[in-house]
Image: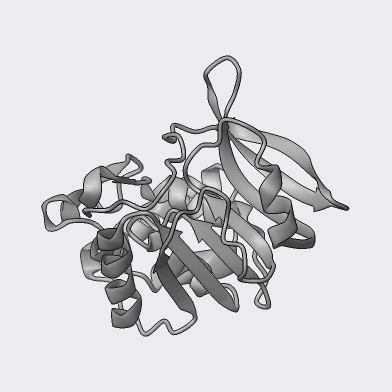
Amino acid sequence: MELSVVEKQEFASLVMRLRSDGISNTALFNAVEQVPRSLFVPPAFVREAWSRFSIPIECGAFAEGVDQAVRLVHLMNLAPEHRVLEIGTGSGYTATLMGKLCQRVLTVDRYRTLVELAHARFGKLGLSNIFSRQADGMNGLPGEGTFDRILVTAAFSTMPRMFAEQLVPGGEMLAPMILEDGRCMMIRFVKVGVRFERVDLFEAPYLPLAPHMASAL
């Protein structure tokens, strides 16, 4: 699916902003160029689709601004053979970008509505390697084997040690964590043996991870 003329202009502006931040990931830029961002926001926010600011979506959730979403995918260090678990499907935009860069993406969300809308978007784009599921992602997704990468877009209050067994040796997890001083920090966790090595990346305004599946939405 090709971008509209307006979206091509927005894409060009995005690339300029990302390059100024030191991101020059050609494969990722090619993936972004193939995905109409407007498909992933409610109709009332189509004009803001390529904004760097968060956009409200269904179920009281928010989609990251496009700069942040692309930046997160860049930080995932994806390879074509990778299997990825995403906790927090949201609009499905980050899962879509990752699906264009790796072998398989399994994305879960506690809201059935978000999962169904994202699934429809994946189908419209012809992406058969992205699988969406309503699930409680508080402890990852045990029973699905191991993953090369895990992306979480809701904040932990304590070190997410239970996720280590769901990563391959040397696997990486990108997740926000609420620090003792109340700040929310995006962190890269790298599996070394049976533990994580941690690298703090940048502050990120994510909400705390909520347990259980939503019963009504």
Q: How many marks?
A: 0
113 sits left or right of 102 in the view: left
On screen, residue 31 above or below 114: below
Residue 139 at what x, y percent from top left?
A: 57, 50
Query: Quarter of the image holding residue 171?
Result: bottom right
> Can residue 71 be spotted in the picture?
yes
55 sits left or right of 199 in the view: left
Residue 181 at what x, y percent from top left?
A: 57, 14
Tell me which residue sits at (55%, 42%) in the image.
21
Tell me which residue sits at (56%, 30%) in the image.
157
Q: What colouring style does the render use?
A: one colour
> Can residue 1 be spotted in the picture?
no
On screen, residue 130 above or below 171: below
The residue most toward the left is: 44
Residue 155 at what x, y percent from top left?
A: 51, 37
Quadrant (top left, top right, bottom left, bottom right) of the C terminus: bottom left
Taking depth in this image into account, of 168 and 212 the one nearest to the observer is 212
Quadrant (top left, top right, bottom left, bottom right) of the N terminus: bottom left
On screen, residue 85 above or below 153: below
Residue 211 at what x, y percent from top left?
A: 44, 44
75 sits left or right of 70 in the view: right
The residue most toward the top is: 181
Query: Quarter of the image holding residue 198?
Result: top right
Taking depth in this image into account, of 33 and 123 the one nearest to the observer is 123
The residue most toward the right is: 193
